Image (cartoon, rainbow, N blue to C red):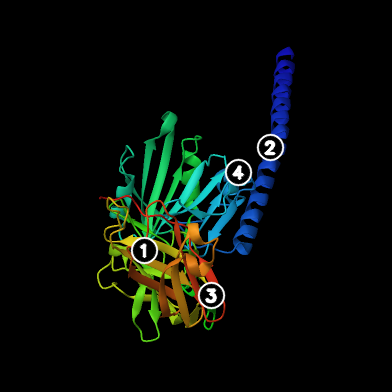
Amino acid sequence: MTKNIKNSKAKSRANAELWRGGFALVPAILVVLAVLVIGAGAYYFATKTKQPTPASTNQEPQASNLPAPENTASNEISNWKTYRNDTYGFSIKYPSDWLASKGSWSEDGGFFYVGFGTSMTADSKPLATLEVYPNQTTLDKFVKYFDYLNGNWKDITLNNVAAKEIVSVGQNSKQIILVASVKNSYGYELASTAFGDNVDTVRKMSSTFEFITTATIPMRIISPVAGQNVEIGKSSEIKLNQPMFAYYSDNVLYKPFVMILVDVNGKRVGETPLFDAGKTSVTWNPRVVSAGYSSSNIEIPVKPGNYKLQLIKSGVSEGEANKVVAESGYFNIVPPVALSFVTSSWSGWPPYLDSSGVAYQSSFSVQWIGGSKYVYLSILDKSLESVGASISKVWESGKLENDGNGTYNFVIPNNLQKDHSYRFYISDDHGNSAYSEYFSLPSGRG
C-alpha cells in the first residue's frame, strides 16, 4: 500500500513536471510562429512593392551634409585689385592692400614700367614690378637680358602662352622671382624685388596675368595741324597721339623712328629733333633742321613755305627702312614780323691782325630771322656809335633779298681795328631793325 502511494506520488510529480514543462514551451512556440508569420508578411510586402534597381559598378557617392573645405588662396586672389593696360595688352591682379603706380617709361625709354607695393610715393620702394619691352621677337632672346640672375630657368605658361620663370638671390640675400613671356612683339617681365619676401605673392600674381587682345592704335601726328602757322624763331611742339618708344636689342638701345620735314614737292628737307622714348612731344624751333643722324651737327635753314611732317622707320629691321608710320597735314612755316639776329660765326680761319693792327681778310657768316622782302646789313664801330649811326658804319651790304630766315656769308673788311668792338645792324623796308651782340677780332697771328 505504501509502495503504491509512493509510486502514485512519483507519477503525479512527473506528470506535474511534464505539464509544467509543456506549458512553458507553449509561449515559446507561439513566439516562433509569430516571428515566422511577420517575416513572411514582410517578405511578401517587400517583394511586391520594391522596384528593381539595375546593378552599377560606378555609383555616385552620396552627397555629404558636411561643408566643403574653403580654398583660401582662391578666395584671397578673388578679392585682389586689377591693373589693366589696354595700350600694352595685359591685365594682372595684385594684393588688395597694395597700390599700383600710374605707369611710365624708364629714363632711357627702353621699357614701360609699373610698380606695385604698399606705398607708391616718389621715394617708396616697390615690392613687385611689371615691365613691358617693345620690339621683342622671341622668348629665348628676351630672357638673355636677365643673364645677371643666378639660377635655372623653368618653362611655364603665362595665360596659356609660353613663359619662363627663375628664382634667384637678389640684394640683401633676398630671394626674388622673375617671370618672362613674349607676345605681339612685346616682352613682359614680372618680378619681385629685394625690398621684401614676396616670391609667393608674385607667383600668385603671375597666375592672374592675362593678355588682352586690343585693336592696334595707329600712331598719329596731332600737332602741328593742317593749315597751322608755325613761326620761325619761336619754339613749337610736335605732338604724337601715343608715346614714342625705344627698344633693346643685344643690350643696345635703339630709337627706331625719326621725324622728317617734307616740302610741297615731296622733298625731304631734314630731320627735326629726336623724340625721347616714352614721350609724346618734342620742342622744335623751325628755323633749322638737321641734315641727318650721321651729320647731326650740320644744320639746314628752313625757308618759309608749306611743309608736312613724316614719322618714318629708321630701317633697323629688314624691309622697314624709310617706311612712313605717320604723316601730318600741310602747315605753314612763316617768318616773324620783327627782325632778330640768330648767330654770327667765323667760317674758315678767323681774321687776324698783322703787326700794325690791320685785319687780314676772312669769311664771316651771320644769320637772322624776320623782316620784309629786302633787308640791309651793316657793321657798326662801337666807339663811333655815339656820333651817329651813319658815321659808325664801317661796312654795309647794300640791299639783300630776304626770305625771313636769312644767312649771309661775306669777307670781313680789312679796315676793322684791333681793340675795337663791333656789332651787326640789320633793317628792312618796313622800319624793322635789330642789333647783334658786340664782337671783337681775335688776336690771331701776325
The local crowd at label 4, few if under 14, some if 14 to 19, many if 20 or more residues have their Cα within 10 Å, is few
Residue with the mark numbered 1: 185
Name the spot of residue 236 as percent of width and height, x first: 52, 69
Residue 135 in view of the camera: no
In the rendered view, does 404 fall on the left or right side of 258?
A: right
**Badge nearest the viewer, 1 or 3:** 3
**Badge nearest the viewer, 2 or 3:** 3
In the rendered view, does 280 fall on the left or right side of 347?
A: right
Element type at mark 3 = loop
The amino acid pointed to by label 2 is Ala
Name the spot of residue 304 as percent of width and height, x first: 45, 80
Spatial CA distance of label 1 from label 2 is 95 Å
In the rendered view, tell whether residue 440 sits above or below residue 7: below
Element type at mark 1 = loop
The local crowd at label 2, few if under 14, some if 14 to 19, many if 20 or more residues have their Cα within 10 Å, is few
Are circles 1 and 4 on residues that touch, CB within 8 Å? no
The amino acid pointed to by label 3 is Pro
Question: Mark 2 or mark 3, which has the lower sequence index?
Answer: 2
Element type at mark 4 = loop
**Badge nearest the viewer, 4 or 3:** 3
Residue, x 53% and y 54% (percent of image)?
A: 103
